[in-house]
Amino acid sequence: MDPHPAAARFEEAVRLRRRRLEDAASQGRKIIGYFCTYTPVEIIHACGFLPVRIWGGVGRAEKAYSLVPSFICPYMRLSLEGALNGEFSFLTGIVQGYTCDVACGLVNIWKDNFKMDLCHSLPLPYNDNQDARIFLRAGLHELAGKLTQIGKGFTDESLEGSLALYEEIRSILAWIFGRRADRGLHLTSAEVLNIVQAYFVTPPEEYLDMLKGLKDDLASAPVPTDCGIPVLISGSIIEDAQVLTLIEQIGFKVVADDLCTGQRGFTPVAGQGEGPMERLMDRIMKRFPCPSRSHPDERVPRLLDLIRSSRAKGVIFLFQKFCTPHLADHPKVSQALKDAGIPSILIEMDEAGLMEAQVTTRLETFYGMLE
Amino acid sequence: MDTNRKSTKRLSTAKDLAKVVAEYYLECHEAKASGKPVGWMPPMNGGIEIFYALGLQPVFPENWSPVCAAFGLTPANFEVSERMGYSRDLCGYLRNIVGYVHGDMNGPSVPLGGLPEPDMVMSFGGGCIPAMKIFQVMETRFPKAKVFRADAPQVAVEDIRDHHVAYAVSEMHRLIDFLEKTTGRKLDYERLKEVVELSDKACLLWDEIMSYRRFKPTPISAAEIGIMFVMVTRQGTQIAVDFLTRVRDEVRERAEAGIGVIEDEKVRLFWDNIPLWYNMGLFNYFEKMGGVMVAETYSAAWSLRLDPNNPIEALAKKSLMSYSLVSCLSIERRKEMVLKACRDFAIDGAVFHQNKSCVPITLGQADIRKALAHELGIPSITIDADHMDSRNFSFAQFQTRADAFMEMLLEKKH
């Protein structure tokens, strides 16, 4: 499939992200980094900051090993490598919604090694009940208070505005994911990844305009005729579009995903409740669950629904090497898929170039099974 | 190959530990046989005191893993869990207990009779991810057990605020409600106060015992750290207080008499991270060259105070602090603790166990090492190993590094 012209702006946003963010910072824009999509970006934005998901990128870590062991995920290793190379000098601070142990540790390591105005880890409740929401609300207000000290004031109105902006973004992304599941999307999965990655590094106002333009283009585009074996991708973060290109070159077609760089990170579009804080909390509590925050028994039915609704014929688990939450759930989740008659395969991704041949062989074998 | 070595203990009370361990597991089996409800739970939280106050039997699957390592059961357990699809990159506690519960749990070859099956599973979020995942597996493995899903804020000790405590307190009340409804027992708050007081006494004794490490020569070393078994399984009981009192008395007597772990203590060492449970003898390794492993970080999890007059809040705070004190939730606090211990105990060198089975404790070690070197001039080495899986440990590599380190420290002393 030829590259879609409307998707080029997103690819450019990703490619030029560092320079653009450095320019923004030099013009006085304060930028807060985060690792995990459970971080409440709406609060950060409502306090006048630009929230940016810290990237790991593609490459090899060297300097990072002076601070962390090799047995943590490549995303965390490479993002630290980037930080040690000055790649994130535009950051005013880091805020992280607690998800996995490694992200939590890395926030503290960044705090110890890089000068920033704020390093805050936000504990999130695992249960959803009245006390849990009281606790979450207090935590969000504490965060807003800290951000206010180094940014602008936080009000219900500013949060309302941020919520509306992000909800609109998520609703268009949901539309794109829906088209993909309906086989009506004229984009490769690498292009879809670029669209998502651009979201993490672009001011949301600008990103919404880009998305609206894309939606118009896609709505009028002809329904694609090319097809492959429809699969769902499940895992945490994917940054290297090459692996997705490889998957589609082999003959698969990604029709759905369970990724934080995909559908999972944007589902649901909005929460319910009276007032912006209640809606924000409701969405956090009702997120399509990541294994770091949930029981596989809660994830499996939702995953099966997604597989059925997208008519995927198989699942490719694409895990970051050493990712404990996903690896720990995998035996149970893959067994549940097997019981439901859905074949799956597990691919672990390490730093660039470390496992390419193995990945190709395994994917080709899986294709042969499904063909 | 020098694995599966037991440590050499010098305290007679520490040698009594085997009896304490056996009695605990016997009690667990007797509880099951007599119909007393058995609950499986994670360690280092306030649930244990609630259990003992209600006359219920707590069992700690995480604690069972070191027992498996000591008895050489881990390879078989790993084989089971790996066959089920659990990756070798996962924490060894998780792989061991998952393998254990899906294998020959109470077979004749299992020491101490194994673990009695749970009537209740205290599943939870709030510690490390592998611990949470362990209990999720237990829920499935024991479908008849009643499940309580607990929650605790993951927050650095220095960042604990009122709303964290309030949520932890509400979780304590929810746990009590669940246990009362499930078992039909009623919590006597006066009894709970007594239990919390015993727990506090155990913590005080713990700190007192650890403080004798300031003596030169040290009367107690990390080789005796197995005594923490009572802090994990017996907190809130007279058994823990009595045992620790005996340990304290012996340690005090040895300190006052100037009796050290070894006769000629030349170098005082510090250990960071969980011990190698399958090779506790490593703590004695340095002794042939005059080195004593005086202290370690893991014991800090029980360096707490509990207010018996406010037992629920005390237990809530314990639940908030214990994990934070030993994990990457609070690298700043860990750094302070390590530096203080190294100052107080006149440490000459530190050994950092880069532990493939415990990322939360391993993360931050590089920062702590730097601080030790820059602020106190204390050198350190890193050894690559795993607290459960001996396949991730090379004794030869350890030996090379440890010997060179000791030579350097001895040279520095002269």
Image (spheres, coloured by chain):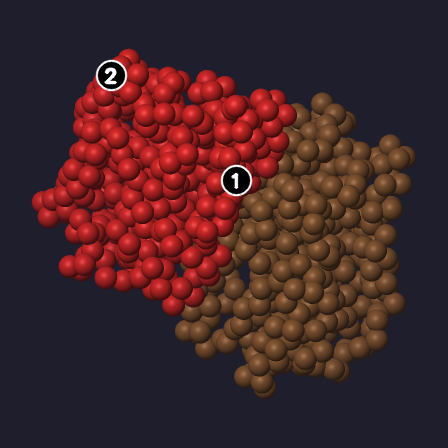
Residue B180 in the image: x percent, y percent?
23, 36
- The image quarter in which residue A368 lies: bottom right
- Provide the letter of the chain coloured red: B
Q: Which mark is residue B253?
A: 2
Residue A282 in the image: x percent, y percent?
56, 43
Q: Which mark is residue B404?
A: 1
Front residue (pair A285, B329):
B329
Amino acid type at mark 2:
Glu
- Work out how far the residue at label 2 is from the one at label 1, CA to CA, in angstroms: 34 Å
The residue located at (51%, 35%) in the rendering is B407
Q: Which marked residue is nearer to the observer: mark 2 or mark 1?
A: 1
Residue A188 in the image: x percent, y percent?
75, 71
- Provide the letter of the chain coloured brown: A
Front residue (pair B315, B354):
B354
Work out whether mark 2 precedes mark 1 in sequence or the reverse, and give the earlier one: 2
SS under mark 1: helix
The numbered mark 1 sits on a residue in which chain?
A: B
**Residue B36 visible in the shown view:** no
